[in-house]
Amino acid sequence: MAEIPESAISEKFLAGTGPGGQNVNKVATACQLRVNVYALGLAPDAYKRLKTLAGSRMTTEGELIILARRYRTQEANRADARERLSDLIDAALVRPERRIKTKPSKAAKARRVDSKKARSSVKAGRGRVRGTD
């Protein structure tokens, strides 16, 4: 779990949407978490991965916005937003493994050519039969 400085985070509670009856109109339970990504001190490659993972949740000013409204209490939504933020940053910090290019062996190339020739001769034998008339 990534350690996120409190100075980089700002929270705001909004009125939630969806089911909840009259309570949803009175109580601001949805949590909007704004994080200044530059204050996290990420490496340039990790920042690039975070930007890709965040997609439209990242603003042009470098703020990451996470909206949590899954639960009916402020505390549960706050915890959910922080957990999702931490997961996102952890995923950005993981370096993808480099793909090692492979090349087919000479024997594999020869087998492929032989099977193509065999298939070609089978198909060539399917032509019209010429009569001796």
Image (cartoon, helix red, strand yellow):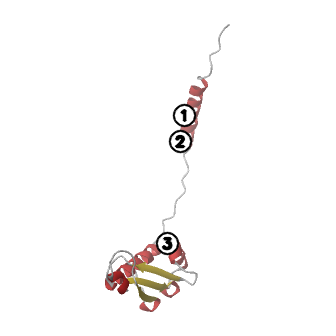
Q: Residues within 10 Å of mark 1 (few under 14, many from 20)?
A: few
The picture places residue 4, in percent across and down from the top left corner, at 42, 85
Mark identifier at residue 108: 2
For the image, the number of numbered tags is: 3
> Looking at the image, which residue sits at the far right?
133
Q: Position of residue 6 (x, y in %)?
A: 42, 90
SS assignment at label 1: helix
Instruction: Mark 1 or mark 3: name the one nearer the start of the chain.
Output: 3
Q: Disc 1 versus disc 2: distance between alpha carbons?
A: 11 Å
Taking the spot 44% from the left edge, 79% from the top edge, the residue there is 66
Q: Nearer the viewer, mark 1 or mark 2?
A: 1
Question: Foreground mark, 2 or 3?
Answer: 3
Location of the N terminus by quadrant is bottom left
Rounded to the nearest whole Å, what is the CA distance between mark 2 and mark 3?
39 Å
Residue kind at label 2, given as amino acid type: Ala
Q: Residue at x 47, y 74 (%)?
A: 92
Considering every residue shown, the one lying at the far top of the view is 133
- Mark 2: few/some/many CA within 10 Å (<14, 14-19, 20+): few
Compare residues 106 and 1 and report the one nearer the observer. 1
Label at residue 115: 1
Nearest to the eye among marks 1 and 3: give it.
3
Q: Earlier in the sequence, mark 2 or mark 3?
A: 3
The residue labelled by disc 3 is 53
